[in-house]
């Protein structure tokens, strides 16, 4: 079995897979035109910004700018790695101003989908011609969701939150993520617990406003959906939690108000011990 890790557009001229890659691209462009002209897919999204401050590894989200009422608390995990001198173990709460400093800060949240219509088509190949086209519709819906999330984040930085109003980056710079801020999602390496999506859904009223639903396992439906948090801190960066010890899992369960066994269930890939 051969695995290829060639980026676009170089893959189009590759001696081994270039011909097939060009064929797939052409087919995708034809299907994309069909999706646009026949309005096959529908896109929905919601975004919001909330007063917030950090309390150690948690983030308190407040009901309004008076910050007198805690609307909900977001729970995060800290790396437990051995690093060189002067290098810290990160937690997402590090990118929100500590409550004790008395400085107002904010956190953003979003959920978008371009999958409305895709799942019906992908399960009924006769509507799009054949199995190959059905798979193509699903693949394009996934790519369009990523594009929606990228464009929304750009507008957040430049307009809605407006912390980088002068940003003017090329496509290559956008792809490299050279802009200020991050948008990690529950389930990402920095926040691997999918159950935290429940708070995001409540804060934004996601299902009511967009129709995007959460399954019992916290998967999003339609599948071509993306959600996450916005952090605007200038030094905010993506990272992975890695393996964590029993002591942190115990503390995490206590903070979330759940039993340790439940916390271990959702954090299983990150456990540095056997429960």
Image (tube, helix red, strand yellow):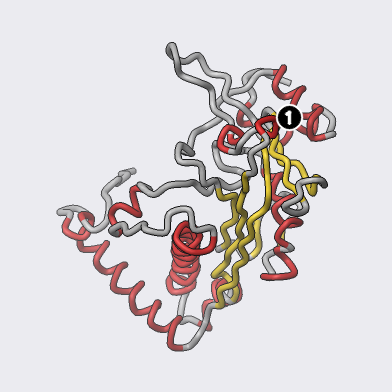
Q: Is residue 6 above or below residue 246?
A: below
Residue 211 image position (x, y, % from top left):
69, 70
Residue at image point 71% right, 37% down: 75
Residue 231 visible here? yes
Query: For the C terminus, which image quadrant?
Result: top right
Relative to 75, 189 lies left or right = left
Find residue 111 and report its image quarter. Answer: bottom right
Q: Is residue 206 above or below residue 58?
A: below
Q: Is residue 171 above or below residue 264?
A: below
Query: For the N terminus, which image quadrant?
Result: top left
Residue 142 image position (x, y, % from top left):
49, 63
Residue at image point 45% right, 15% down: 86
Q: Residues within 10 Å of mark 1 (few under 14, many from 20)?
A: many
Give the SS element for disc 1.
Answer: helix
Residue furthest to the top: 85
Label 1 belongs to which residue?
A: 264
């Amino acid at each position: 079995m051969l695995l290829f890790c060639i980026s676009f557009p170089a893959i189009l001229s590759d001696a081994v897979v270039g011909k097939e890659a060009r064929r797939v691209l052409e087919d995708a462009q034809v299907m994309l035109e069909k999706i646009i002209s026949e309005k096959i897919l529908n896109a929905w999204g919601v975004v919001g910004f909330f007063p917030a401050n950090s309390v150690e590894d948690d983030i308190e989200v407040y009901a309004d700018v008076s910050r007198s009422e805690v609307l909900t608390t977001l729970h995060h995990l800290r790396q437990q790695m051995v690093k060189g001198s002067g290098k810290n173990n990160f937690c997402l709460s590090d990118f929100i101003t500590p409550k004790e400093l008395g400085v107002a800060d904010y956190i953003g949240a979003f959920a978008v989908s371009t999958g409305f219509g895709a799942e019906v088509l992908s399960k009924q190949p006769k509507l799009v011609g054949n199995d190959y086209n059905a798979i193509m519709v699903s693949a394009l819906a996934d790519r369009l969701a990523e594009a929606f999330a990228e464009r929304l984040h750009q507008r957040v930085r430049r307009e809605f939150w407006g912390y980088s109003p002068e940003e003017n980056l090329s496509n290559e710079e956008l792809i490299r993520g050279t802009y200020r801020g991050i948008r990690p999602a529950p389930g990402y390496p920095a926040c691997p617990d999918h159950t935290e999506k429940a708070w995001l859904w409540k804060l934004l009223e996601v299902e009511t406003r967009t129709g995007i639903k959460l399954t019992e396992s916290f998967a999003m439906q339609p599948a071509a959906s993306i959600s996450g948090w916005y952090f605007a801190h200038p030094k905010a960066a993506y990272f992975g939690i890695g393996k964590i010890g029993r002591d942190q899992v115990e503390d995490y369960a206590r903070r979330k108000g759940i039993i340790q066994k439940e916390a271990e269930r959702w954090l299983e890939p990150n456990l540095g011990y056997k429960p």
